[in-house]
C-alpha cells in the first residue's frame, strides 16, 4: 500500500509542477498588466505539438518539448500582435475568445499516420492518444518527476535572477504605468510582445510535459476554466515574485484538493479567497512588500 | 534559497544538461498491450469497480503484470486527484480487478498503467453516474464530444 | 433559395434567445462599466436551484420560473457586493494611484473587478454542481409539440412555434426596456448615474442604490433568459454557465456593450451567422465562427468603435 501512496504523491507533485508552469505563464502577463484567459490554448498547442513530435516522428523528449515551446512562443506572439494594444477588458475577452478558437480548432484537426502498430496522431474530437515516449524508453514516474521538477527549478532560477536585471525592472514598470515606462526609454510594445512569446513558450512547455505524463490528451481539457485557474493561482499566490504562482498552486492542488478535506468545496474556497485578496491584498500573498521585507530569503539583498 | 546557490546558476545548468543527455536518445518502440475495460459504479462517491483484460499483441493473455488503475477528470485535469489503485489478478488469465474511489459523477478518463512484462498506459473515457441504493450501474464509454453544449441548436430544423 | 430562407429563419429564432441572454450582461456593463464574468454562473446556479426544486417537489412551472428569477437576483446581489460594490466610488486617478492594484493603468479597476468576477464564477459553478451532481438534469419543459409549416412563395418553411414565441418575447422585452430607459424618469436616473456619477451624486441621486438596482435587474433578466432557454430544452447541464456567458458576450458586443437595442441586433446577427456557419462548416465550425467573430470584433479596428470604448454608457 505504501507503494501506492508514494506513487500517488509522485503523480500529484508532477501535476503541481506542470500546473506551476501554466501559472507562471499567466504571471508573466500579469506583470505587464494584462489578464489573459487564453494561456490554456498555448498549453494545449504545446501538448499537441510535442506529442506529434515524439509519438509520430519519434523525436527525443527534449527536442519534442523544445519544439512545443517554439510553437507556443510563435502562436502567442502572433496573437499578441493585434491584442496587446487593447484595453485590459478587451484583452481579457480577446484572449478568452482565442482560447476557445484554439480548442475548437484542435477538435477539428485530424492527422493520423500508420506506424505499423496502428494509427497514431490527433484524432479531432476524440483526442490524441498513445503519446508513449516515456513508456517506450522505460522512464519511470520518479525519473519523469525529477525531470519535471528540474525544468521548473531552472525556469524559476532564471526568472528570479532576472528580477534584478533591467528586463525585470522594465517589466514591472510597464505593468505599473505604461506611459511612465515609455518616458524612461522602455519600448513598451516590443517588451510586451517579447513577454507574450515567453509566456506562450512556458505554457507550451507545461503542456508538453503534461501530454507525456498522461499519454492521452483531448481538446476538452484545454477549456477556459484551466486558464482561469492559472490566473487565479498567480493572483492568489502573489505577483511580487516568481514563487508566488507556486504558492497558489500548492495551496489549491496541494492543500485544498489533494487532502480531500474540502471535498466539493474546493472552488468555492479558492474563488472566495481570490476575490477577497483582490479587495484587501490586491497583489496576492507574496506581494512586493512581503518580498522586500524577507528579501534575503529570496536571494536578493533588498532594493537599495 | 541563499544567494550563493543562486549565483552558481552555471553549475546547475551544466549538471542538469548532463542529467538530461540520456533522455535525448531516440525513441525505441516497445510492445503494446491490448486493453478491455469494463467498469460499474456504485455507492457514494461514486465508487468505480473495474475489470481489466490484458492481452499481448499476438492475442495471448498478459499474466502476472503489475497493473495500476488511475482516473482523472478531463474537465479539470489536475484537480480531483484520485489515489491510484493496484489491480489484483482475479485468477483468470489476463484479468485484473480494482476499485477506484471517485470524487463526483461525470466523465472520467480511467487509465490503466502496466508495469510488468511490458510498459504501457492506456486510457478510456467513461461516463460515471451515481447509482442509487444497492444497485450497480455500468459506466458506458463516453465520447469527449458529449462535453459540448447540447442546447437546442444542434437539433437542426424541426423536431422537438 | 429555400434552404437559405430556412437558415435565416432558424438563425433569427436562435438569435432572439441570444439577445435575451445578452441583455442582462449589456445592461450591467452599461451601468457599471464592468464586465461581469460571473453572469453565466449566476444564471446556471439559479437554473439549478429551479431544477432541484422541480425535481424534489412537484411544483408548477410558473413557480420554477419565479424561483429562477428570484434566485438570479439574489445571487446577482452577492456578486455585486463581492466584486463591483466599490466600482467607481473612488474617483479614477488613472495610473498613479494603482500601486496597490494587481492590474495598474487607466483601466486597472475594471480589470480588477473582472478578475474578482471570475473568482466568483468559480464559486457559483462549484455550488451549482454540488447541488445537482448529475450531468443531465431535468428542467420543466415548455417545448411545443408541433411545428408550423408556413407556405412561403418558395416552398414550405418550418417554424418552431416555441422558439418563435421566445424570439418575439425577447424582441418585445428588449424594445420595451429600451424605450423605458429612454423615456421614463427612472430610466433617465439610471442613465445619468451611469454616465456622470459625480454629477448625479451632486444632484442628490442615490447612485449606489441605482447601480445595485440596475445590476439586480440585469441578473433578474439573466434568470428569465435562462428559464426561457432551458424550458425549451427540457434539461440543464454543467456546461450551461459557460454557454450563457459566451453567447451573451458575443451578442452584447456585436450590438455594442451597454446598448439595450443593440443587443437585439447583435443577438439576431449572431444567430444568423451561426446558422450559416453550421450549414457550411458543421457544428464545430459553428462554434469556431462564434469565437472568431468575437475575436474579430475586438481586434479589427472598426470605425464605429463606441461599443468598445469604456466611456460609452447605458443606452436605450
Image (spheres, helix red, strand yellow):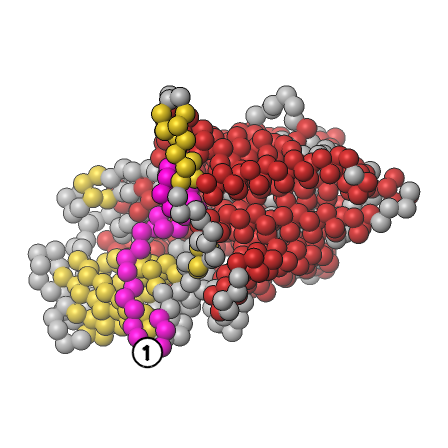
Image coordinates of residue A259 in percent, x first then y, are 49, 72
Q: Position of residue B109 (x, y in %)?
A: 33, 59
SS majority, magenta: loop
Whether residue B150 appears in magenta in the rendering, the answer is yes
Which percent across, then down, holds residue B90? 18, 75
Residue B65's quadrant in the figure? Answer: bottom left
Counting every numbered tag in the picture gives 1
A14 relative to A9, above or below: above
Q: Relative to residue A151, is residue C152 depicted above or below?
A: above
Vertical side of B129 occupied by A32: above or below: above
Q: Nearer the viewer, residue C151 or A144?
A: C151
**Residue at the image point whose x is 59% and y is 36% from the top:** C171
Where residue A32 sits: x, y (%)?
Answer: 64, 41
Residue at 65%, 35% in the rendered image? C175
Q: Which residue is mark 1?
A: B134
* Residue range highlighted in magenta: B131-160
Per the image, label 1 sits on a secondary structure element best described as: loop
- Is A52 placed above or below C7 here? below
- Quadrant the C terminus of chain C occupies: top right
Kindly identify which chain the residue marked by label 1 belongs to: B
Q: Is residue C15 visible?
A: yes
Q: Which of the pair A157/A241 is nearer the observer? A: A241
Of B84 and A299, nearer the camera is B84
Amino acid at each position: 500500500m505504501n507503494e501506492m501512496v508514494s506513487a500517488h504523491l509522485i503523480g500529484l507533485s508532477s501535476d503541481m509542477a506542470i500546473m506551476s508552469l501554466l501559472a507562471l505563464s499567466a504571471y508573466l502577463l500579469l506583470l505587464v498588466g494584462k489578464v489573459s484567459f487564453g494561456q490554456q490554448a498555448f498549453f494545449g498547442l504545446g501538448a499537441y505539438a510535442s506529442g506529434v513530435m515524439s509519438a509520430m516522428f519519434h523525436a527525443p523528449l527534449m527536442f519534442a518539448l523544445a519544439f512545443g515551446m517554439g510553437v507556443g512562443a510563435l502562436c502567442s506572439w502572433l496573437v499578441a500582435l493585434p491584442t496587446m494594444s487593447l484595453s485590459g477588458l478587451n484583452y481579457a475577452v480577446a484572449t478568452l475568445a482565442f482560447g476557445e478558437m484554439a480548442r475548437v480548432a484542435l477538435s477539428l484537426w485530424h492527422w493520423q499516420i500508420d506506424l505499423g502498430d496502428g494509427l497514431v496522431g490527433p484524432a479531432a474530437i476524440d483526442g490524441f492518444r498513445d503519446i508513449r515516449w516515456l513508456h517506450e524508453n522505460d522512464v519511470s514516474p520518479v525519473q519523469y518527476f525529477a525531470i519535471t521538477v528540474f525544468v521548473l527549478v531552472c525556469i524559476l532560477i532564471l526568472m528570479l535572477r532576472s528580477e534584478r536585471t533591467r528586463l525585470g525592472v522594465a517589466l514591472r514598470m510597464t505593468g505599473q504605468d505604461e506611459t511612465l515606462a515609455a518616458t524612461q526609454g522602455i519600448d513598451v510594445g516590443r517588451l510586451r510582445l517579447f513577454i507574450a512569446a515567453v509566456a506562450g513558450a512556458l505554457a507550451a512547455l507545461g503542456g508538453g510535459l503534461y501530454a507525456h505524463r498522461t499519454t492521452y490528451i483531448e481538446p476538452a481539457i484545454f477549456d477556459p476554466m484551466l486558464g482561469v485557474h492559472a490566473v487565479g493561482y498567480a493572483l492568489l499566490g502573489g505577483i511580487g515574485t516568481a514563487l508566488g504562482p507556486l504558492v497558489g498552486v500548492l495551496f489549491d492542488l496541494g492543500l485544498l484538493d489533494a487532502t480531500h478535506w474540502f471535498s466539493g468545496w474546493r472552488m468555492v474556497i479558492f474563488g472566495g479567497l481570490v476575490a477577497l485578496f483582490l479587495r484587501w491584498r490586491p497583489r496576492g500573498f507574496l506581494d512586493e512588500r512581503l518580498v522586500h521585507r524577507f528579501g534575503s530569503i529570496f536571494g536578493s539583498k533588498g532594493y537599495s | 534559497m541563499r544567494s550563493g546557490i543562486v549565483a552558481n546558476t552555471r553549475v546547475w545548468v551544466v549538471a542538469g544538461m548532463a542529467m538530461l543527455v540520456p533522455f535525448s536518445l531516440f525513441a525505441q518502440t516497445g510492445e503494446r498491450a491490448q486493453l478491455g475495460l469494463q467498469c460499474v459504479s456504485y455507492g457514494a462517491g461514486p465508487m468505480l469497480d473495474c475489470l481489466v483484460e490484458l492481452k499481448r499483441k499476438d492475442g495471448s493473455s498478459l499474466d502476472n503484470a503489475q497493473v495500476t488503475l488511475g482516473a482523472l477528470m478531463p474537465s479539470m485535469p489536475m484537480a480531483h486527484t484520485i489515489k491510484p489503485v493496484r489491480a489484483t489478478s482475479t485468477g483468470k488469465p489476463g484479468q485484473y480487478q480494482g476499485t477506484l474511489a471517485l470524487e463526483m459523477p461525470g466523465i472520467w478518463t480511467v487509465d490503466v498503467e502496466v508495469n510488468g512484462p511490458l510498459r504501457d498506459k492506456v486510457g478510456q473515457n467513461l461516463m460515471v453516474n451515481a447509482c442509487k441504493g444497492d444497485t450497480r450501474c455500468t459506466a458506458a464509454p463516453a465520447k469527449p464530444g458529449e462535453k459540448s453544449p447540447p442546447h437546442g441548436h444542434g437539433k437542426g430544423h424541426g423536431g422537438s | 433559395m429555400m434552404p437559405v430562407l430556412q437558415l435565416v429563419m432558424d438563425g433569427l429564432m436562435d438569435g432572439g434567445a441570444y439577445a435575451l441572454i445578452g441583455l442582462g450582461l449589456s445592461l450591467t456593463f452599461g451601468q457599471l462599466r464592468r464586465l461581469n464574468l460571473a453572469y453565466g454562473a449566476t444564471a446556471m446556479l439559479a437554473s439549478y436551484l429551479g431544477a432541484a426544486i422541480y425535481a424534489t417537489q412537484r411544483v408548477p412551472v410558473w413557480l420554477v420560473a419565479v424561483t429562477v428569477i428570484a434566485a438570479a437576483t439574489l445571487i446577482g446581489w452577492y456578486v455585486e457586493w463581492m466584486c463591483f460594490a466599490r466600482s467607481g466610488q473612488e474617483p479614477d486617478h488613472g495610473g498613479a494611484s494603482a500601486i496597490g492594484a494587481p492590474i495598474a493603468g487607466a483601466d486597472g479597476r475594471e480589470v480588477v473587478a473582472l478578475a474578482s468576477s471570475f473568482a466568483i464564477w468559480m464559486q457559483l459553478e462549484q455550488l451549482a454542481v454540488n447541488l445537482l451532481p448529475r450531468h443531465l438534469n431535468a428542467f420543466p419543459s415548455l417545448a411545443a409539440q408541433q411545428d408550423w409549416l408556413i407556405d412561403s412563395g418558395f416552398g414550405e418553411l418550418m417554424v418552431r412555434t416555441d422558439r418563435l414565441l421566445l424570439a418575439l418575447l425577447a424582441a418585445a422585452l428588449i424594445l420595451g426596456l429600451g424605450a423605458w430607459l429612454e423615456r421614463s424618469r427612472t430610466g433617465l436616473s439610471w442613465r445619468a448615474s451611469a454616465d456622470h456619477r459625480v454629477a448625479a451624486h451632486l444632484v442628490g441621486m442615490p447612485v449606489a442604490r441605482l447601480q445595485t438596482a440596475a445590476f439586480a435587474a440585469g441578473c433578474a433578466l439573466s434568470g428569465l433568459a435562462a428559464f426561457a432557454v432551458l424550458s425549451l430544452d427540457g434539461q440543464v447541464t454543467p456546461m450551461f454557465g459557460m454557454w450563457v456567458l459566451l453567447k451573451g458576450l458575443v451578442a452584447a458586443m456585436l450590438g455594442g456593450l451597454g446598448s439595450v437595442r443593440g443587443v437585439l441586433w447583435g443577438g439576431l446577427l449572431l444567430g444568423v451567422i451561426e446558422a450559416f456557419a453550421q450549414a457550411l462548416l458543421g457544428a464545430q465550425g459553428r462554434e469556431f465562427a462564434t469565437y472568431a467573430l468575437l475575436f474579430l470584433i475586438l481586434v479589427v479596428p472598426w470605425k464605429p468603435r463606441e461599443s468598445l470604448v469604456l466611456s460609452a454608457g447605458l443606452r436605450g
